[in-house]
Amino acid sequence: MAQTIGELARGMQPSTVGYRAVDRQTLALDALSKLTWQFAKEPDFRRLVDVLVLTISGQFTVGNAFAVVHNPHMQSGEPLCTGSGKFMTDTMPVEMLKCPVCQDYFLQHPHPIRVADLEDFHALREAATRAYESGVRLVTPLLLGDRVIGLIGLGEKVTRKPFGDDEVDLLATLANTITPFIVNSFLFMEIASLNAWYLDILDSVRQGVFVIGSDAKLQKVNSVGVEILKLCCGETIDMESVFESPLETLFPETSFPGWSRQFKLAAGRRNMRQSEHLVAKTADSERIFKVGFSRVDQGDGGEAGLVITLDDVTAIKESEERLFDLEKFADKGVMASSIAHELNNFLGMILGGVELTRFALNKGNVEKAGAALDKVMANGERMKRYTQGLTDFTRLETRKKIADINAVIADVLSFVRVQKKFTRIHISTELDAGLPQFEIDTDQIAQLLLNLVNNAADAIQEAGRDDGKVTVVTSGDKDSVTLTVSDNGCGIPPNVKEKLFMTHLTTKENGHGYGLVTCSRIIDHHHAVVTVDSEEGQGATFRLQFDLHPEEPSDAVASDTSPETDSFV
Ligand code: ADP
């Protein structure tokens, strides 16, 4: 049977060698501080614990020692264990650290203990015997709050004498000093690996990234950033000194005209993210960069730093310019298409009027035929006004007068209904008779409504419905009037919806994409706001809200000098 610890220890005398505890403590702490420096230079935690064990072995003149430590910032995971001599491969230190009974004991007795003395604690006897048999003579916990994060164990002394009280005290001092150091070192290592990860990411992006501190000096730059500096300032740039340089030196005026001023302005602005295009000069050409700024607040109310990203968009800009040239060539064709689209709408109204006239004449109703012809004339006039405007499309006029929008709607729909395109479509109206009259250009409102109902008819045809319905509704009060046109056509897909009114976009085989762009001009001129609701396959609703008291005074003749081709005069 194995000897008890008491038996094993019996006969050993406490060390009689006199220690000058203060000297030893000074030496030990000195050794630790050297360790700290070494670690700061090379943050390798395993090496740190290795050297710690060696240092302790030297201080206590023991042949064997171990240190076993948990990552203090993690609740789980295997502890890191390192030992000298016979503890090098022993699993006992890890078992001891993980043993709940040992942990309880050390929480209640947070100081070094001679393993022989553990015999008195019944619950610990098994673990203590195993430790003693493995050769541990003195063990101390490393405590962080209410957690045992590690143990340091010392084997027998070279002199084979038991540890004296002063040595126990020394180990206690060392343990107290080492614990915060270990906690910080773990943190330091995690920060270092986070930093390495962050630098890896910075280096893997295709933008140049510059991190500028609140002192306006460069703190970090990624490899693309360095390449940009070299490209613009020459290969000779001294990368050592750039970290100490102010922004003006980092981005000199000769290569980066106006850049440093822009950066300073950006750092002073409140909104966190902005971007703009800036031109840099290389030895033989110019490069265009999309420059992004993000202000980085320190969180302590101190001065803000800045992260600058540089994206070389020279190639994109060049191809955009080429496209722009092509667009200019295309403009003439664009204009012709736009005109054709609008004239087609007017012609549709005129043909509708002629149809109405013939219908009335067939019935012998000369009076109705005359009225229909008057409307044909009126539409001819609208068309004339439109074509006249085309001869001078740098000046587009809106002629507003107080009028009844319901009357315009009724007028347009009476012509639309008889058009072939609408024969199988039911057009219904709910026009609010109490609507206030307000300032409108009646021709433009007619043009607007025509575009909306024509699109509705196209959408119904596209959906292949034979129960097509278009509903025109007006409502309002003294402040605003709303005009709604809805249909049960094919609906508008989200990617088309988001571009409506902005670009010449069409999804129709013979479309041009001018209708809604024209509408958007009319809407603007009438201080109206448009909203579109649609679900694919469920139809669409266009809602226009006219503000009757716009802040901008409404002129009888408003002019628009933009050279857009989709004119309406
Ligand atoms: P175009 O009629 O020549 O295509 P528009 O500017 O009038 O030009 O319309 C642009 C696009 O908007 C149409 O091609 C169509 O995809 C979509 N659109 C407009 N109105 C509707 C509607 N009521 N239902 C479904 N899609 C519509």
Image: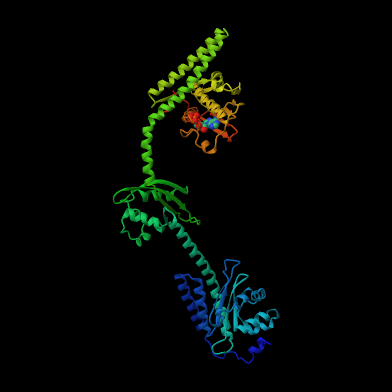
Q: Residue at x 37, y 60 (%)?
A: 244
In the rendered image, residue 506, in percent from the top left (x then y), is placed at 48, 32
In the rendered image, residue 348, in percent from the top left (x then y), is placed at 50, 20
Residue sitting nearer the eye, 416 or 19: 416
In the rendered image, residue 415, in percent from the top left (x then y), is placed at 54, 18
In the figure, is residue 204 to the left or right of 62? Answer: left
**Residue extending furthest toward the right:** 122
In the rendered image, residue 336, in percent from the top left (x then y), is placed at 41, 26
**Residue extending furthest toward the bottom:** 11
Q: Residue at x 50, y 64 (%)?
A: 191
Establish if 72 lies above or below 400. below
Establish if 116 lies above or below 413. below
Residue 358 is at least partly visible in this image: yes
Residue sitting nearer the eye, 191 or 497: 497
Q: How is the image coloured?
A: rainbow
Quadrant location, the C terminus? top left
Q: Residue at x 48, y 19 (%)?
A: 347
**In which quarter of the view is residue 132 placed?**
bottom right
**In which quarter of the view is residue 490 placed?**
top right
Residue sitting nearer the eye, 251 or 231: 231
Establish if 426 lies above or below 69. above
Quadrant location, the N terminus? bottom right
**In which quarter of the view is residue 411 placed?**
top right
